[in-house]
Amino acid sequence: MRSNPQAPPTAWELTVSCAISLPYGVLFNLPTRYYFAIGYPGAFGLARLSTLLIHTGFHVPHATWVRVFLGEPPMAAPSEAARSTMLHGGTYNWSISVPLARLLAKSARLLMEHILQWGRPLDSANLTCARTLFDHYPSPSQPTLLWNLMIRAYSKLQNSQESINLFHQMVSLDHLMMVAPDKYTFTFVITSCSHQISVVFGQMFHGMVMKNGFESNLFVGNSLINMYSVFARMEDAHKIFNQMSDRDVFSWTSLVRGYAKNEDMGRACEIFDTMPVRNDVSWAVMISGFVGGRRYIEALRYFKDMSFDEKVKPNEAVLVCALSACAHLGALDQGNWIHAYIDKNEITETSNISTALIDMYAKCGIIDCASRVFNGISKPDVHNYTSMISGLSIHGLGKNAVCVFHQMLAENVMPNEVTILGVLNGCSHSGLVKNGSSIFYRMQSSWGVLPKIEHYGCFIDLLARAGYLERAFEVVKSMPIEPDIVIWRALLSACRIHRDVILGELIVNHIDQLHSGGHNGGEVLLSNLYASLGKWEKVTELRELMGERKNESNPGCSWIEVNGVVHEFRVADQLHPQIVEIRHKLSEVLRRISLRGYIANTMQVSFDLSEEEKEQAVAWHSEKLAIAYGLMTTRPETSIRIVKNLRTCEDCHSALKAISKVFGREIIVRDRSRFHTFKEGNCSCNDYW
């Protein structure tokens, strides 16, 4: 039994060795009170415990030791004589063995409940041990409680198929009148269906719920709402909700979550507004729903409303979502307020909160604050490192990103695919071809990360930006996966910068193939390319085709935060309440920078217009409107911070350099690819983005 016969027996082995010789059905049981007295098996391990329980030969102990089991267990180590008696002594005494057998049989159930309910966090090893005990239960059928525990355990580990299989085994015993599913059984098995198994199974269990009379049960109803929501069957989910005679906050929250996840925030808001009671989870569902739908301003508005509700306090999920919204909008004032709230209320900065803070400060343009948060973490994990590396990269600090990456490896923290994507992006924007190449070619062999199309895109962008166009094109042709429009866009941008017309024409042919396959991104890019070459017939033909398919490019949108309020601007915006004054201010700005040498760059206007009309088209881009509003509403000595959802066009880039010089303002713009800090007529990207 023991791998090392010289080692002293552990308390656990003494317990098993003291068990009496009984029929096979109770060989694997042990006194539960002794189990709780010595604590969790710990280093002894549940796997070894299961082996002992099932395969150990048992002795009949001395009557004294049986009474020990029935009374209080000794906490001190037994003497050598006692150990010898326990291991080798004793005679059969069935008058003692029978009551002890009953105790041991009961203990199996309690042990299994302990493993599944009160033991360490459930994992596959724990579940395997529990299943071993479950399969060897010493009676014709296990109690319903044990079935429920096993079904719930598999559901928690998202092993839905095994959970459903167990349910079917249970139902087969039900036909023999041995065990019957109850309301908890249906709750757990329906939850298993929510792990994207099949709505058919869910509907089948729904029918069984009605047959067994559990349709009015609160827990079963909540699980049905959640299940139908997962499969986007919101009419069915709402019907279940309306039929429930008893609802709690989880019933309401489940329905709100369903509409939010299915991108119907209008209905989610209607239901949320009528909730009789809200908790932190309810608010988290709404705020995360807005963030998931890229409605960041609404997310922050709801977070502000929540802060006024004295009955609830933001939990980790709420804080992370709110910080994410601040990061996307560049809402530094609100991000600072949330950080101060965390400190004031002494909320523990978990890994998720720290990661969100680093991301928020980096994306709001304050990389020093992001570094301070990162340096304050005693033992950063992969998510903390990834957020810091990505933040440095979008600020064009590629060398710093590489240094943090090597620090991460020195601390034996393994990078994931997002980490490597972040450091490759930093290498790309800093021209670190040698570092980027080394990391790209080592990512699978050294860190077990299989390159995805995003990694190829960053690496190809790195090579192309640095002027290695032919090498980049060879990498594209050797890719094991089909290159997408992002890959071709990176090459085309580099061809334009380096004026490589021949390679550009080859790339156009590949984009034509994407165009014939109906790729929207390829159609838009190809349309802009034709426009820059003056091929207006091709542009018209392509745009008509896009119109038939209802394919539209993503409109430019910019955000600026002034006095804690985020203002949104779209290209040629007419919706802002101060749009007349803003347009007047922008006209003045363009006039002043034109006097200092600014000339509108109309090469990217993809319509056949006169030059004057093209200049008007680029004049009302969203970031220019946001800058004009910032000049109107902020003090002369303050920086203006803008977030743009797309890549900043060449004309806006030139205009912002001129504005920073003429008006003496620092302008910080975060576009789709990186940060641009405009100051005294220059940009931190060195005109290379």
Image (spheres, helix red, strand yellow):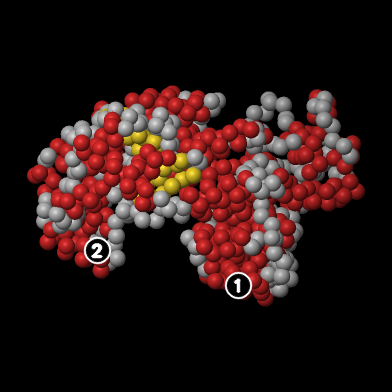
Label for residue 19?
Answer: none
Residue 444 visible somewhere in the drawing: no
Left or right, 274 with reference to 457: right
The image quarter in which residue 385 lies: top left
Instruction: Name, please, the residue furthest toward the bottom.
Output: 211
Q: Nearer the viewer, residue 354 or 79?
A: 354
Q: Secondary structure at mark 1?
A: helix
Residue 364 lies, with reference to residue 166, above or below; the image says: above
- Is 411 above or below relative to 225? above
- Where residue 471 sits in the image (x, y, percent)? 17, 37
Instruction: Give percent across and percent down for residue 232.
Output: 50, 65
Q: Residues within 10 Å of mark 1 (few under 14, many from 20)?
A: few
Q: Which residue is mark 2?
A: 546
Residue plotted at (56% across, 38% down): 338
Give residue 239's mark.
1
Q: Are marks 2 and 1 in contact (CB under 8 Å)?
A: no
- Residue at image position (49%, 40%) is 563
Between discs 2 and 1, the one toward the N terminus? 1
Q: Residue, x 40% and y 29% (percent of image)? A: 637
